[in-house]
Amino acid sequence: MPSMSDQQRHINPWLIAVSVMFATFMEVLDTTVVNVSLPHIAGSLSSTIDEATWALTSYLVANAIILPMTGWLASTFGRKRLIMGAVLGFTASSFLCGLAPNLASLVVFRIIQGATGGVMQPLSQAVLLEAFPPKDRGKAMGFWGLGIVVAPILGPVLGGWLTDTYSWRWVFYINIPVGMASLVMTQLYIFDPPYLKANAGRGVDYWGIGMLAVGIGALQFVLDKGQQDDWFESNLITILAVVSAVSLVALVVHQLTSRAPIVDLRVFKVRSYAVGVFLMTIVGFVMYGSMVLLPIMLQTLLGYPPLQAGIALAPRGLGSFIMMPMTGALVGRVDARKLLTIGLVVGGGTMIWLSRMNLNAGYWDLFWPQVIQGMAMSMLFVPMTTIAMDAIPREQMGYATSLFSLMRNIGGSVGIAMTSTLLARHTQQTTSLYGANVTAMDPTSQALFYQMRGAFMAAGADITTATDRAYAALFGMVMRQASIVSFVGLFQILGIVFLVVTPLVLLMKRPRASSGASAAAH
C-alpha cells in the first residue's frame, strides 16, 4: 500500500493549490467583508456602531493569537487534520454568526471564526511551497497571492452587495458552500509529509502559549482600539501596551531557550527571510493603510455611497488579477529581486500619483493609479515570498510561513492605526490653520460669504437663516479643503516609505529557482 507521501507525489500540485486557495480566500475575505455591514449589524442587534466594532476586533485578536502558533500546531496535530479542523470550525462558526440573536453571541462566534481562520494562510502557503518544485514555486505563489491581494479588495464590494440585496447575515452564510468544497478537496488531495509525523510527540510549551496569547492579543487590541480611545490618554490602552511589550520580550527570551518552541525564531538566521519579513511588514503597512484612506475619502469628500466606493476600489484587484499569474511565471525565469525592486518603486510611485488628486477627481482619475498599483502589489507578494522562503528548511517551513503572515497582518494593523490617527490629527490642524485665514479682514473670504448668503436669500431664506447657512457652508469648504490636503499628504508619505525601503532588496540572496533558470538561459 503506498504511503501518504507517495500519494502526495502522484497528485497534480494544482489540485492541491485549488484546495488550499478555497480556505485562504474565504479567511482573508472575512477580514474586510463585515466592515460595510457594521451599521446594519448594529441596528439589527440593538447596539451602537461603536459596540458593533467588537465583531471586528474579536476576530482580529483571535486570529493574531493563533497565527504564529500554526507551525507548532501543524507539527503536533498534522497539517491535514489541522486544515480540515480549521475549515470545519470556520464554516460552522460562520453559520452561527449568521444566526446570532444578539451582539454578545456574535462576538463569541467571531472569536471562534478568527481562531480557526488564523491557521489557514500560513498552512496553505507551507503546503504550496512543498507541493511544487523550486522552479514552479513562483507560479504557485502567484496563484496564492492572487487570493491574498484580491480578497480584501473584493470584501467590501461583496459585503455591501449581500447586505443591500439580502441582509448582513448572508455575509457569513456565503462561507458555507466554499467551506464545504474546501473540506472535500482537502480530504482528497492533501497529505502530511513524513517529517511532521516524526515531530508529533513533542511536549507542550504552556508558558510559551500563555505569553504569546497575552502579548499578541494585547498588541492587536491596542492597535485596533487605540485611535478610538485617544491612544495613551486611555489608561486601558497604556496598560495593555506595557503588558504586550513585556510579554513579547519574555516570549522571545523563552523561545530562544526552549527545546520545543511554539514559535521557532531560528528561521531569522536566514538573512533573506529576515529582510523579507521586514519588507512584508512594510507592504502590509502601506497596503492596508491606503485601503483605509481611499474608502473614507471617496465617501466623505467625493460623495460616493458605500457600495459605489467599494466598486471604485475594484481596479486595484483587476490589476492584481492581470499581473499575478504573469509575475508567478517570471519569478522562475528572471532574478526575483529585480521584480521586487520594480514592485516597490512602482508601488511607491502610484501612491505619490494618488497624492496629486483634488476634490474634482472623478472615477477615471482613480482608475489608472489603482490598476497599476494592483500590478505593483503582485510584483511584491510573489517575489518576496519566493526569495524569503527559498533557504528555509522544510521542517521549519510551517514556522516561517506563520511568522511571515503574522508580520504582514501586524504591519497592516499598524498601518490602519497610524493612518487613521495621522488623518484625524492632520485634518484638525489644517482646519485650524485654514480657518484662521477666513476672517472679516480677508476680502476673498468676505466676497465668498456674501455670495453664498445672497444665494440662500434668493432661495427664500431670511437674512438670519441665510447668514447662518453661509457661515456653515464656508466652514464646510474649509473642512473639505483641509481633509483633501491631509489625505493626499498621507498618500505621499506611504509612497515615500516604499521608496525608502527599496535598497534593502540588495541584502536578499537570489533564489535558487531564478538562478537555475538564468543558468539554463545562458
Image: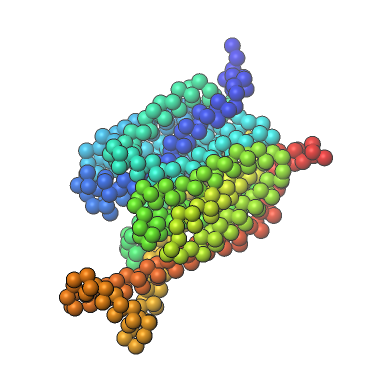
Residue 237 showing in the rendered view: no
Please indicate whether residue 337 sits to the left or right of residue 111 in the image: right
Q: Residue at x 50, y 28 (%)?
A: 19
Is 134 located above or below residue 320 in the figure?
Answer: above
Q: Provide residue 138's location: percent of width, then percent of height.
A: 64, 38
Residue 39 visible in the shown view: yes
Point 52% across, 29% down: residue: 18
| Above/below status of 292 relative to 55 | below
Question: How far from the left and from the top, in percent, is residue 178?
Answer: 42, 30
- Depicted 300 relative to depicted 259: above or below: below
Q: Quadrant of the N terminus?
A: top right
Side of 58 relative to 259 (left or right): left
**In-front residue for pair 327/126:** 327
Camera-nearest residue between 202 and 285:
285
Q: What residue do we see at 62% from left, 20% from top?
A: 10
Residue at 41% over, 36% down: 116
Q: Residue furthest bottom?
A: 441
- Which quadrant does the C terminus fall into? top right
Foreground residue among 164 and 415: 164
Which of the colour schemes (rainbow, by chain, secondary structure, one colour) is used? rainbow
Residue 301, percent across and down?
A: 37, 62
In this rendering, the answer to whether 491 lies above or below 517 is below
How many numbered marks, from 0 up?
0
Residue 74: horizontal and vertical position, in percent?
Answer: 50, 33
* Picture quadrant where residue 108 is located: top left
Outermost residue to the front = 458
- Residue that extends furthest to the right in the rendered view of this protein: 522
